Image (cartoon, coloured by chain):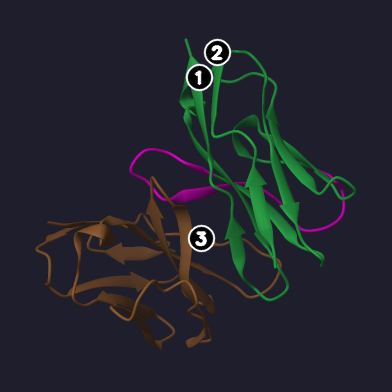
Amino acid sequence: AQSVTQLDSQVPVFEEAPVELRCNYSSSVSVYLFWYVQYPNQGLQLLLKYLSGSTLVKGINGFEAEFNKSQTSFHLRKPSVHISDTAEYFCAVRNPGNQFYFGTGTSLTVIP
Amino acid sequence: DAGVIQSPRHEVTEMGQEVTLRCKPISGHNSLFWYRQTMMRGLELLIYFNNNVPIDDSGMPEDRFSAKMPNASFSTLKIQPSEPRDSAVYFCASSLVGPTEAFFGQGTRLTVV
C-alpha cells in the first residue's frame, strides 16, 4: 500500500524568502508524483508532476520539485515567495493501480 | 473544456434528509474519484470508478453513502439519511487512466444541521 507524509502541517515564511515543503512517500512499486495547491473555497489545482525522466520538475508560479528515489521524497521549493502563494499544498502519489493517495496538506502562510 | 463540474456548490440540509451530490467529469476521462475533505481527516478518497465501474469503495464510510456512475459523463454521491458529521466539502475529480494527473471540481460544501 502507498502512503504520503507531509512533514510540516504549517509553514510560515516571510515574503521574498525561499520555502521548501517536504513530502515523503512509501511504495513498493514505481509511482507518479504530484503537488497540488488549494486556495480558499476552491478545488485542488495541479502545480507540477513527476512521471518519468528528469528528477527536477518545474511547475506553475515558479515552483519546482525534485524526485529523490533513494530517499522516497518529492520536496517542493520556491526561491522567493509572494503573498499570493498563501494556500494549502498537497503532495500526491498515483500507483499503477490507478489510485491517488494524498498527504494531509501543508498550510503555507506568507508574511508581509 | 469547462473542467469537472459539480453541483450544487453549497447544500444545507436537515439531519435525516437525503442528499445527492452530482459530478460531470471532463469529456474523455475514464477515471472518476470522489473525495471528502474535513479539517480533522484531511482529504479522504471515498470511491473511484474506471470506465463507469466502481473499483474501490473501501473509503465509503457507511452504508448511508452510495455512489453511482450510470454513464461516462455523470456520477452521483448520495447520503441517506444524512447526519451532522457528514458536514464536509465533497470533491469530484476525473482523469485518464495511467501516468497523468487528476482534475478536480470546485467542490460541494455540505452542511447538515
> Is residue A80 found left or right of B4 in the rendered image?
right
Kind of residue at disc 2: Glu
- For residue A110, the mark is 1
Judged from this view, the residue extending furthest toward the right is A70
Residue lying at 18% horizontally and 75% vertically, measured from the top left: B81
Residue lying at 48% horizontally and 13% vertically, measured from the top left: A111
Say whether mark 3 and mark 1 are on the same chain: no
Q: Which of the 4 quarters of the picture holds residue A92?
A: bottom right
Q: Which of the 4 quarters of the picture holds residue A93?
A: bottom right
Q: Are marks 1 and 3 in contact (CB under 8 Å)?
A: no
Q: Chain of mark 3?
A: B
Kind of residue at disc 3: Phe
Please give the residue where the numbered disc 2 appears in the rendered image: A15
Q: Are marks 1 and 2 in contact (CB under 8 Å)?
A: yes
| Residue A42 included in the magenta stretch of the image | yes
Q: Position of residue B71 (x, y in %)?
A: 40, 88
Real-space CA distance between mark 2 and mark 3, rounded to the nearest whole angstrom: 29 Å
Q: Position of residue A112 (x, y in %)?
A: 47, 10
- Which chain is rendered brown in the image? B
Real-space CA distance between mark 1 and mark 3, rounded to the nearest whole angstrom: 26 Å
Please give the residue where the numbered disc 3 appears in the rendered image: B103
Q: Chain of mark 2?
A: A
Question: Of residues A91 and A79, which is closer to you in this image?
Answer: A91
> Is residue A85 found left or right of A58 in the rendered image?
left
Kind of residue at disc 1: Val
**In this rendering, is residue B113 above or below A107?**
below
Provide the residue span drawn in magenta.
A37-56
> Is residue B108 found left or right of B58 in the rendered image?
left
Q: Chain of mark 1?
A: A
| Residue B65 included in the magenta stretch of the image | no
Q: Secondary structure at mark 1?
A: strand
